Amino acid sequence: MACILLDVDGVLHVSGVAIPGASGAVAELRSVGHALRFVTNNSTRPRAQLAQELRDMGFELEDDEIQTTARTAARELAGKRVFALVMAGVVPDLEGLDLVGEGAHAVLIGGCDETLEPNQVFSYMNLARAFAEIQMGAELYCLHKNRWWQTSRGPLLDAGAFVAGLEYTTGVEATVLGKPSPAYFASALDALGAEPELTWLVGDDAEADIRPAQLFGMRTALVRTGKFRPDTLEGLDVTPDVVLSSIADLPGWLERSG
């Protein structure tokens, strides 16, 4: 049996609506013995809430089966004073960090969601404070650098624009803590006790999911849901092992492929 890393947004659901057949596919993958881990760049809600939302959609999982970027940040930035531009919902997963308004060792940029809160998090004054902290020597980190994500309303701007803006104005490159960071994938594999060549990554984003996973040595399945577009594969320097209509097709394909 394989170890399988499952992206969440765009693979299991879009804007809280489960993709048809997704919960049944996850249950079937478990029933035949595949080891699963849910890997997400969602940086707007804590792990416990994300897990409960998935259970409410019909997925069976435990809280600790989800790997979040905020948990990674808490581990990587332990002991540092952190100026964090993050949604209020992820603060519980940053437990243990010294969150400060100035005099930071590190600036941490989180993600966006569909509420009005990002207008407050990424206000001019907050971004200017982040700029000043970096100018005074703080390191720049981000939970992810996604350009956009797929919602029921269509594509929406994500936090990558703000990260890129700070990089441009400060000349400092951000350290990415979530996908496509190799450290993020390594942590997921460690949690399963898995080797890359024996692990599948299932994602909807060729750039942030498929390409880095293949470079890390994993096998990959790209699904035609979420962020997938007809021209997704054009210009990509790696090719997924398989392209499926949705995760609902994954159990059957794995069984047929042996």
Image: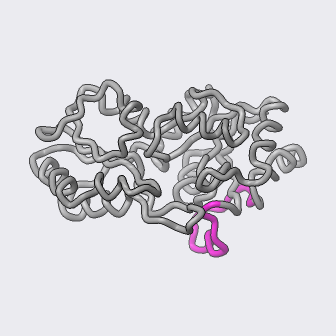
Name the residue nearer the viewer: 155 or 114: 114
Q: Tell me: 209 left or right of 3.
A: left
Span colored in magenta: 226-243
Q: Main secondary structure of the magenta part?
A: loop
Color style of the picture: one colour
Q: Tell me: 197 left or right of 163.
A: right
Vertical placement of residue 161 versus 191, above or below: below
Residue drawn at (46%, 41%), measured in percent from left and top? Answer: 45
Query: How far across and how far down the image is residue 226, in percent?
Result: 63, 60
Query: How far across and how far down the image is residue 6, in percent?
Result: 65, 43
Query: How far across and how far down the image is residue 128, in percent?
Result: 16, 57
Residue drawn at (42%, 60%), measured in percent from left and top? Answer: 158
Q: Tell me: 191 left or right of 159.
A: right
Residue drawn at (43%, 33%), measured in percent from left and top? Answer: 71
Residue 4 covered by magenta stretch = no
Name the image quarter holding the C terminus.
top right
Name the image quarter holding the N terminus.
top right
Query: How far across and how far down the image is residue 227, in percent?
Result: 59, 63
Vertical placement of residue 182 versus 121, above or below: above
Vertical placement of residue 181 versus 122, above or below: above
